[in-house]
Image (spheres, grey):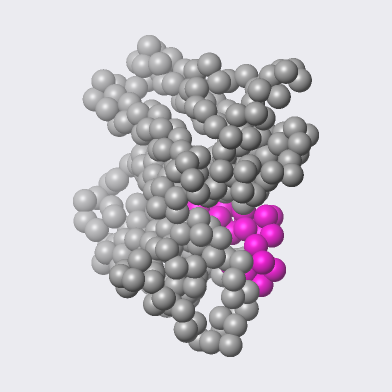
């Protein structure tokens, strides 16, 4: 779901559906007349008028289908969750005391759909681009929902046997928080399309620190609205995260750890190396869709490994 959302963003498909009908919007346009009606609605948007006025219906279908599939997958996830949940409750496999945590998963999934529409609406008024703030919030919510579901799953797979925390639990939790912040900075890069400037590495053009990093007033806006600053801070966060992961691996690779935790520590290093390589390649090649989508997917994989280690070291 997250990867498809990233591809939708990268292909400029997110604003192709200008209305949101959670129940009745399941079916796509089924005939030429319906396609024409949907296309005419799109023609009223800033994106069409300012960027895609050359489009015909056939071109419009190319961006419509990705956004449609993204929304359809969201509905499908809701059904795939709700139906087995009700069945397991009926059979008594899920106890009453566990209802709240599974109900919360379902509610959070529904609210994520609302947040997604709130994001899309920001690109249907004057600016033909969605707000980078709302985009980052939508991605953060996706990661948090996933983290909650994954944590519950890990607790079922590996029930805690002790209450004592490993001495490295706090450091692992801090590293996971840094990974999350780095991912969120990447959302601002995507929202501002900041990956399409300064396509060199390790320098940004001729500079280590580009001269326009503080071009906006007040200064804090640069960290969220300035393309150069947003790319620079993502580089700094990514490199810092990578260096700390290498140091973390070097310290723990000889520690007395359970085998599954040791495998997780190794996986964290391998995934970080892959993520950095994908990030640099994405930048140097000016954000090809396949590499950029892979970069986002591996970000979630890195987040997953970090969560796995947090859970294992907590008890």
Quarter occupied by the N terminus: top right
Residue 185 location (% of width, % of height): 43, 62
100 displayed left or right of 112: left
Report the front residue among 166 and 83.
83
For the point 37% across and 33% down, which residue is it? 111
Report the front residue among 140 and 146.
140
Q: Which residues are magenta?
A: 279-302
285 displayed left or right of 190: right
Residue 48 visible: yes
Residue 302 visible: no
121 displayed left or right of 39: left
Task: Check if residue 291 falls in the magenta segment.
Answer: yes
Residue 279 location (% of width, % of height): 59, 67
For the point 36% across and 42% down, which residue is it? 148
For the point 65% across and 28% down, which residue is it? 40
For the point 27% across and 27% down, which residue is it? 100
Quarter-of-image position of residue 15: top right
Residue 308 location (% of width, % of height): 41, 53
Task: Check if residue 97 falls in the magenta segment.
Answer: no
| Position above or below: 188 against 130 | below
Report the front residue among 304 and 137.
137
């Amino acid at each position: 779901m997250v990867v498809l959302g990233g591809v939708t963003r990268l292909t400029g498909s997110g604003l192709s559906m200008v209305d949101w009908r959670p129940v009745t919007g399941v079916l796509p346009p089924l005939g030429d007349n319906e396609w024409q009606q949907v296309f005419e609605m799109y023609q009223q948007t800033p994106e069409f008028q300012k960027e895609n006025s050359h489009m015909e219906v056939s071109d419009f279908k190319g961006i419509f289908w990705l956004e449609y599939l993204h929304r359809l997958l969201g509905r499908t996830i809701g059904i795939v969750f709700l139906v087995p949940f009700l069945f397991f409750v009926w059979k008594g496999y899920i106890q009453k005391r566990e209802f709240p945590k599974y109900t919360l998963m379902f509610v959070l999934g529904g609210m994520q759909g609302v947040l997604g529409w709130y994001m899309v609406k920001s690109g249907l008024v004057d600016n033909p681009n969605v707000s980078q703030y709302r985009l980052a919030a939508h991605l953060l919510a996706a990661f948090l929902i996933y983290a909650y579901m994954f944590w519950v799953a890990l607790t079922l797979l590996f029930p805690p046997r002790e209450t004592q925390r490993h001495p490295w639990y706090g450091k692992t939790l801090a590293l996971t928080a840094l990974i999350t912040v780095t991912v969120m900075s990447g959302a601002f890069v995507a929202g501002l399309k900041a990956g399409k400037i300064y396509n060199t590495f390790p320098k940004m053009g001729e500079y280590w620190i580009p001269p326009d990093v503080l071009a906006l007033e007040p200064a804090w806006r640069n960290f969220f609205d300035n393309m150069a600053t947003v790319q620079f801070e993502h580089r700094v966060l990514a490199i810092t995260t990578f260096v700390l992961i290498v140091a973390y691996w070097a310290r723990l690779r000889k520690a007395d750890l359970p085998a599954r935790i040791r495998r997780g520590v190794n996986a964290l290093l391998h995934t970080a190396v892959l993520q950095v390589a994908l990030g640099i390649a994405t930048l140097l090649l000016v954000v090809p869709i396949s590499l950029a989508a892979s970069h986002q997917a591996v970000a979630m994989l890195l987040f997953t490994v970090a969560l796995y280690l947090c859970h294992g070291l907590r008890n």
